[in-house]
Image (cartoon, rainbow, N blue to C red):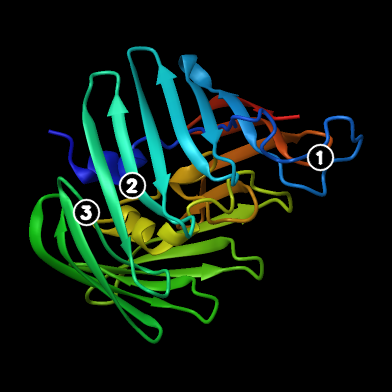
Amino acid sequence: MITSSKIGFFILAILTISCGGDDNNNPSGNDPNDPNPSTLPKYVQYEIGPQGTNVQYVYNEHDLLEVWTETYPGFGFEITTLYNDDLNPIVLDYVDSQQVTDSKGFFYDLQGRVFRYIDDYTDVSLTYSNDSIYFNGMIDSIMDLSGSMIVDPQGKVKTFNGLDQYLTFAYDAFGNMTALNQHDNQDQLIAGYAFNYDNKTNPFYGQYTPLYLTRYIDLFWGFETVNFTGLSGYVFPYNPNNITAVFRDGANIRSYLIAYDNDSYPAIVSEIAAGNSYQYDITYFP
């Protein structure tokens, strides 16, 4: 059985790489003859990762992610996103190479906010009250769960209240998450994480914006450790810049050495963790 924590947004276990494509073969709108197209966004076309991992993205005519295809030896999956007339995601269809399928649906209120999202193992309702968001329902097939989030004036989640713990977050002036602190219900610190960034564009930033709060529920309900750092792509596309280091309780647990292309977008990324190094090669549409 595939639970929502296993696919969690269908992709929470796939935390390494991302890429992009478009029916027009030029989703950024950049003139390929323009010697300096950096004034417009660039979209990842392919990314080749370690151990035979290969990812491709396809975007629709609005430059919104439509199809994510990822393959690696022995397994693969495809996620297709459908949008409503307001260009908000309403359905995420998942199918893997073992023909396991699932579908997550999203429902919006008149203000364009998700008030419910469902799949076979999740049925969560969200209620909004000033700077507080309350949620309740079924998570990972467990009924009658509830929690809440508190957001800052910019709409960033600053506190996430779960079942037996709570998390606090801090952000820099650009909106990058710089700290995540995990506490038990007796206010004892369990773990503290910190993140460093470059000053370059995160090519995954700006997609799935309407799903920001639902992504926090998917990622941080039952939180145990950070699993969305570095090249997590569309798992957490909410940091404007690229992570260069991750710390837990002051110790460096992951670093990223980034080589950029002529437009200052990541082209080659080396991830160093637990004494091992992994390389990711990123190709953009011209």
Observer-nearest of 27 and 38? 27
Percent x, y of residue 183:
31, 69
Q: How far from the left and from the top, in percent, is residue 173?
A: 66, 71
Check contact, mark 3 vs mark 2: CB within 8 A.
no
Give left or right: position of 211 versus 126. Answer: right
Can you say whether 185 is above or below 175 in the image? below
Viewer-nearest of discs 3 and 2? 2
Residue on which disc 3 sits: 118
Marks 2 and 1 close (CB-CB < 8 Å)? no
Measured from the top left, where is residue 232 in percent x and y?
A: 49, 41
Q: How far apart are marks 3 and 2 (CA)?
A: 10 Å
Q: Which of marks 2 and 1 is in front?
A: 2
Residue type (three-letter) at the residue carrying disc 1: Asp
Numbered disc in front, either 3 or 1? 3
| Distance between mark 3 and mark 1 Cα atoms | 40 Å
Instruction: Say the numbered circle drawn on residue 85.
Output: none
- From the image, tell me which residue sits under label 2: 91
x 66%, y 66%: residue? 174
For this orientation, the residue located farthest to the left is 143
Secondary element at image label 2: strand
* Figure check: 76 above or below 234: above
Which residue is the site of mark 1?
263
Q: Residues within 10 Å of mark 3 (few under 14, many from 20)?
A: some
Amino acid type of the residue tagged 2 in the rendering: Val
Quarter holding residue 97: top left
Residue at 22% from the left image edge and 53% from the top image edge: 118
